Amino acid sequence: MTALSILDLIRVTEATDARGALDNARDLAAHAETWGYRRFWVAEHHNMPGIASAATSVVIAHIAGGSKTIRVGAGGIMLPNHAPYVIAEQFGTLERLFPGRIDLGLGRAPGTDQVTLRALRRPPEAADHFPQDVLELQAFLAPAGPSQRIQAVPAAGTNVPLWILGSSNFGAMLAGELGLPYAFASHFAPDHLLSALQVYRSRFTPSEQLERPYAMVGVNIIAAETDAEARHLATTQQMSFTNIFRGARGLGQPPIEDIESYWSPTEKQQAMRMLARSIIGAPGTVRAGMQALIAETGADELIIVSDVYDHAKRLRSFKLIAEAGADLASAP
């Protein structure tokens, strides 16, 4: 069966401040584990007023502390922004606090704009060292050797499971060669989904962490009682993507009746290209969309973004998605 998981953007909205967004995420995770979701991830973003997950490891601790069984992790940490040693310390500590529940997804993008990179002290060539940094981080999480002078305390020996995240063939190739699970960001960059999965599976080499390829596919899903209501709720995300092209990354906005009055034809084309894999509708529509996506990609797991403005309606969306996705079969 195909597992379902959640990627939460920790949205700060016009109605909810950063603390409210963090508490909403914690509340959603507590509900999600009762609905059968496997994991709950948050992502590193910087200098974005509408996203409150910049201090990703701290956010993970807050969410994990309010839940009991669901896996909680990073989807992901932008590793070139950090020393692998520090990330090992952080996630090793999380694993000690919440044993058997922590995931560490790794990306090589900055998670912000070029100006903010200077504030992060991130050198331009940092992304070039991503493969080596992944291996270094993995080594710090492994059991320490008897003569190892530098240990990541208390991370050594925790073996926090690593994932490679990507939206191109580069991450797919690296994940395959290292024998790590792979998550593709088709919730905002769907163009290379199928080719990246093919590269990952063809390049896969078994490792101590993973014997066979394991692919996760990101997808936007918004569920409601009717197709029309779901399309109305989806205008919040459509406005957010439109605002990216306007250089106005602000707070989440409530849904509107007529999205055509908000975006220009060019903005619509740009936004809908990024949102091309979205599934929006009533439970029957959502189930059919998920089944088609699984059949097309052979995904072992779907990680779902449901960017709904109102928290109660977002909870309802995720509950309907879980019910619609129950017992979805993996494609061969």
Image (tube, rainbow, N blue to C red):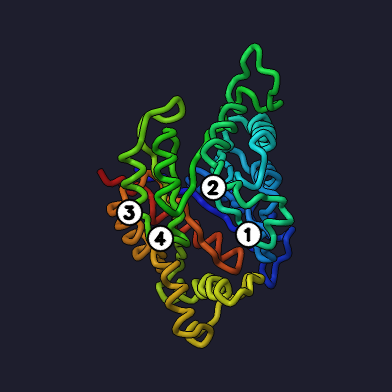
Mark number, residue 310: none
CA gap, disc 4 and disc 1: 20 Å
Neighbour tally class for label 2: few under 14, some 14-19, many 20 plus, Cα within 10 Å: many
CA gap, disc 2 and disc 1: 12 Å
State which tag comes first along the sequence, 2 or 1: 2
Label 1 amino acid? Thr
Relative to 205, is 237 above or below?
A: below
Q: Residue at x 42, y 27 (%)?
A: 207
Label 2 amino acid? Gly
Residue beneath disc 1: 112
**Residue lying farthest to the bottom in this orientation:** 261
Q: Are marks 2 and 3 in contact (CB under 8 Å)?
A: no
Q: Secondary structure at mark 1?
A: loop
Neighbour tally class for label 3: few under 14, some 14-19, many 20 plus, Cα within 10 Å: some
Residue beneath disc 3: 194
State which tag comes first along the sequence, 4 or 2: 2
Q: Nearer the viewer, residue 332 or 82?
A: 82
Residue beneath disc 2: 107
Q: Residue at x 68, y 72 (%)?
A: 14
Label 4 amino acid? Pro
State which tag comes first along the sequence, 1 or 3: 1
Q: Residue at x 64, y 42 (%)?
A: 64
Residue 61 in view here: yes
Residue beneath disc 4: 190
Q: Depth-wise, is mark 4 or mark 1 nearer the camera? A: 1
CA gap, disc 2 and disc 3: 19 Å
Q: Are marks 4 and 2 in contact (CB under 8 Å)?
A: no
CA gap, disc 4 and disc 2: 16 Å
Residue 40 in view here: no
Q: Is residue 108 left or right of residue 298?
A: right
State which tag comes first along the sequence, 4 or 1: 1
Q: Secondary structure at mark 4?
A: loop
